[in-house]
Amino acid sequence: MSIFSLHLPLLILCLFINLNQCKASTIPQEVSFENAWIRLVPPSSQITGAYVKIVNANIDDRLISAKSSISESVEIHSMFEKDGMMMMRQLENGIVLQAGEISILRPGGNHLMLIGLQKSLSLNDKVPIELEFEKQGKKQITFEVKEASGMNP
Ligand SMILES: [Cu+2]
């Protein structure tokens, strides 16, 4: 009886540690990014879109703002259809990201809008954009300038 009562707390502790390790190996500790790209636009254009796949970490978070040295501002936008026309609007509250969720910023959907371009873009240029998250802070991501036809890269 006494041996059993001594070992039970140890057993529970081991189970708890194993569960934590299991969770850590499947859900990343830190938000990560894939396929970050910017739409190539003619030198006369003052705006362009930036897109990226955001793989959130193991906490609920929110993308609250973005900025880049190549444009006056970077806004978070969504697209919607009105009277048969595609329109876009700024998402004042950013984009909510639940723990472990993937959020894809893509042409025709949520995207980043670079407004007031301060230099012309060339194919394959590498452009840093800083994304700020409510809980995970600021992240520097390198976007590559690519050509896009229609809604798909
Ligand atoms: Cu936009």
Image (cartoon, rainbow, N blue to C red):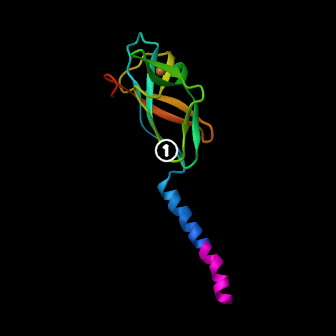
Please give the name of the residue rendered at 68% of the width and 89% of the height, measured from the top-left corner: 2
Looking at the picture, how far across and down is residue 40, in whole percent?
38, 21
From this viewpoint, is residue 82 visible? Answer: yes
Q: What element carries label 1?
A: loop
Direction left: furthest residue: 149
Task: Identify the image quadrant of the N terminus.
Answer: bottom right
Please give the name of the residue rendered at 67% of the width and 83% of the height, measured from the top-left corner: 6
Direction top: furthest residue: 44
Image quarter of residue 151: top left
Above or below — where is 10 with respect to 44?
Answer: below
- Viewer-proximal residue among 134 and 37: 134
Please give the name of the residue rendered at 49% of the width and 44% of the height, measured from the top-left corner: 101
Q: Name the residue under label 1.
A: 101
Residue type indicated by callout 1: Glu
Q: Is residue 7 magenta?
A: yes
Mark 1 Cα shell of 10 Å, populated few (<14), some (14-19), many (≥20): some
Looking at the picture, how far across and down is residue 94, in whole percent?
57, 30
- Viewer-proximal residue among 54 and 142: 54
The stretch in magenta equals 1-12
Looking at the picture, how far across and down is residue 8, in whole percent?
63, 79
Looking at the picture, how far across and down is residue 5, in whole percent?
67, 83
